[in-house]
Amino acid sequence: MIMTSMTCIRFIKKIFLGASMIIIFGNKFRLKIYILILLTSFILPFIIRVLIADEKNNYKYIALIIDDFGNNTSDTQDFLDLKIKFTGAVMPGLENSEKDMLNLKKAGKEIILHMPMEPHHGKKSWLGPNCLLKNLGDEQVKKNILKSLDEIKFAVGVNNHMGSKIMEDERILNIFFKILKEKELIFVDSKTTNKSLAKNLAKKYDLKFYERDIFIDDKNLNIVKQNLVKVLEIAKKKKFAIAIGHVGPAGGKITAQAIKEFYAECKNQKTKFITLSELSRITF
Ligand SMILES: [Zn+2]
């Protein structure tokens, strides 16, 4: 009978296994060594992998964005002093845009561009330079976006300052998202309108895209803290939540203080504050 190569290999394996068994089980010391090798090589790494995966699944992630940097307001330092990870959204073209951006960088915070966009209601003076207006031509829109990204050079992404009108404008969002895709930047829709077209267009460009879950500011410290508890509840349900607060008159020292107190209170609840780029690297 002619033996095929596969049968031959199987035969050799059986002999080798049998011989090993005789050697191993014929000596108690060798048996212990064998069990030790088995444990360290296969079983322990498997248990560790399962534990790590389980730990990861139990975590709730909060990506906190603080909007409106670039104005060098008196509360800027309160945010820079926070011993917690957050992403600072810096407005372009302001006297203190660069200063605030560099201070955020120095404090180890992540940075995104806070792109000013025309709203349905509100003053144009709240937008600042290089903003996106509905009546701008394609070339000017592109120019304003590129100039702003150039200026906020450490930005890992973008979110919108105001912009209820622009976030409903397919033409401008197409120009915007094409640039973001080319530069591999994240986009966070601040959700200033419930008619935003951003989510669908982001799919078209395969962008790293997120939506704001909750604005946390209030003039009352306890309400800001309650809002942060709501953020935690959202994170429990969908593993992560995106909260937006503000430096300056819209939020300021009260928001910074509430974040500080909330952080101290939820430290042991398996909650992690992460930056946007960290969030974009986690698979849920
Ligand atoms: Zn803003």
Image: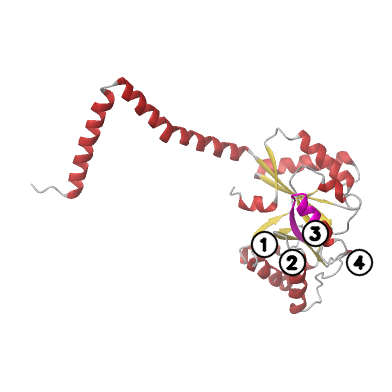
Q: In this orientation, does residue 226 appear?
A: no
Q: Amino acid at mark 4?
A: Ser
Q: Farthest left residue?
A: 1
Q: Residues within 10 Å of mark 2 (few under 14, many from 20)?
A: many
Find numbered disc 2 in the image and state the secondary structure of the residue it sits on: helix
Give how far apart the Cα atoms at labels 3 and 1 are.
15 Å
Residue 90's disc number: 3
Judge by depth and name the residue closer to the eye, 119 or 208: 208
Circles 4 and 3, Cβ within 8 Å, touching? The answer is no
Q: Is residue 211 left or right of residue 16?
A: right
Question: Is 109 inside the magenta-drawn segment?
Answer: yes
x, y percentage for residue 13? 23, 39
Circles 1 and 2, Cβ within 8 Å, touching? The answer is yes
The CB of the residue at mark 3 lies under 8 Å from ligand 1: no
Q: Which residue is mark 1?
A: 185
Circles 3 and 2, Cβ within 8 Å, touching? The answer is no
Marked residue nearer the N-terminal end (4 or 1): 4
Q: Amino acid at mark 2?
A: Leu
Give how far apart the Cα atoms at labels 1 and 2 are.
10 Å
Q: Which residue is mark 2?
A: 149
Marked residue nearer the N-terminal end (4 or 3): 3
Q: In this orientation, does residue 15 appear?
A: yes
* Residue at left offset 38%, top offset 31%: 37
Give how far apart the Cα atoms at labels 4 and 1 are.
27 Å
Q: Which residues are magenta?
A: 102-113
x, y percentage for residue 215? 80, 50
